[in-house]
Image (tube, helix red, strand yellow):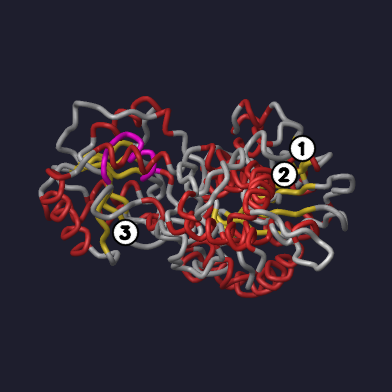
Amino acid sequence: MPDGVASVMAAASLSESNGKLMIGAPPAPLPDATAVPNDGPALPFSVVPVVEQALLTPEFCAKPDRVVPTPEQAMAHAFSVVGAAAAAVESAANAVCVAASLIDANGYDGRIDTMREGVDPALAAARCLIPPGHGADPRRQFRRVAIIHYWLVTMRGGERVLERLLALFPEADIFTHVYDPSAVSDTIRARTVKTSFIQKLPGARRHYQSYLPLMPMALEHLDLRGYDLVISSESGPAKGVITAPDALHMCYVHSPMRYLWDHYHDYRDATGLINRMVMPVLCHGLRKWDTSSAARVDRFLANSRFIRGRISKAWRRPAEVVHPPVDGTLFAPSDDVSREYLWVGQLVPYKRADLAIDAFNRLGLPLTVVGDGPMAAQLRKRAGPTIKMIPRMSFDQLRAAYAQCRALVFTAEEDFGIVPVEVMASGRPVVALGRGGALDSVVPGRTGVFFAEQTVDAVVEAVEAMERWLPAFDPQESLDRARDFAPEVFDRGIIAGLV
């Protein structure tokens, strides 16, 4: 190796051992490798291959007809090459920072070299959104955007996600099976909404689920020619649309249809005799279509690791996790914290409000149950003197209940579960079932306590554990954790899916 090259390589090795590399003007003549300056920024990669590659250009190759560079010339050239790459290195570093939330969502424990779920961190970083000023917004490549949402007859978690998608894609058109303008927000009403032929069938707004067997055909009849980006929002049938050959179809999955897959037997047992007889035939055909139509999707995004696993099980497709957006700025902690625990949700069987009521009857502790549904009457009879049942609250009342409760009791196995994040954004902890989406949001020992089984004994033990732990609880931990689910984090995950 020529003396100049050898000097630079020695300097680079020394710089690397000190964990620094100065990028800028070439240094003064270096009679000794130990004189390399060491006041530049630390870089998270080996500098030796970078400098070595810089020296492998024709003017510095050791050929007989070439002049061997001096150490000063070699170092000056190496630093000019590395300096030119500095902007690209900075951009890559920023991009990796932007990818941190995506990497964490897809199964990391905080260290990039320690994976829990086998997701390639290089792939996650490469797929991330390049920050503004460091590259083009990938949304600009699409001329027309269609968003397919299963039905628009209420405002729940899926519709809140739809609102955020509409903010990301202001010119998007909405396609859905059934649309009730009076039941949705102004944000959705302000957009162009096109419906399938299901909308014209008798009683569709109220009994839309009765037309489920016709929805595959209805989706395939939607004309999406001219749309080069199609985003389907899947909980009911949405992903089975037929797109243009050159269109990107990205599917955001709230859940594969529960009544076809893992909750099929629960739904069948809860229905009437005629439906119990018909469901096996209809659901068998719908499952085949649901599985085959997954091949029409180019890219899947799941709202939690739990749903990612269900996508893999039902459709045999990989998915990246992008948690739903939760606007923590709508909530705030309170100095007036009561002794009452809180349960919030629909009073339907899978939510398991009965577990909370039975557990607090046994504990003799105060519990407020907020919600209504088909189980309301029987649960009121079940509730003891320490339990209050409130059918509904205004948003302001619910915000106050979140901020003032001793802790939330969350007994359901949910796809994600937005209520625990809203409670954490209010500075309060959560007692949660350690399954489903709660595993992505609640951090045991920092923001809450888990129980392992849906039994009264398990809930009682978890509440007793919460009582012991509460003196050590720091509300700031909950507030910080809630910020991990901010709308901006969701935005980055969606845009990353376009790359």
Q: Amino acid at mark 2?
A: Ile
| Nearer to the camera, 50 or 322 | 50
Question: Does the magenta segment cover residue 454?
Answer: no
Residue 93 location, x and y as percent?
56, 47
Label 3 neighbourhood size at 10 Å, few (<14), some (14-19), many (20+)?
many
Residue 300 location, x and y as percent?
65, 59
**Which residue was labeled with disc 2?**
147
Label 2 neighbourhood size at 10 Å, few (<14), some (14-19), many (20+)?
many
Task: Please indicate, yes or no, whether residue 256 appears anywhere in the rendered image.
Answer: no
Q: Secondary structure at mark 3?
A: strand
Question: Does the magenta segment cover residue 428?
Answer: yes
**Which residue was labeled with disc 1?**
173
Residue 105 location, x and y as percent?
49, 55
Task: Please indicate, yes or no, whether residue 351 appears anywhere in the rendered image.
Answer: yes
Q: What is the chief secondary structure element of the magenta stretch? A: helix
Q: Secondary structure at mark 1?
A: strand
**Which residue was labeled with disc 3?**
433
Relative to 135, 18 lies left or right: left
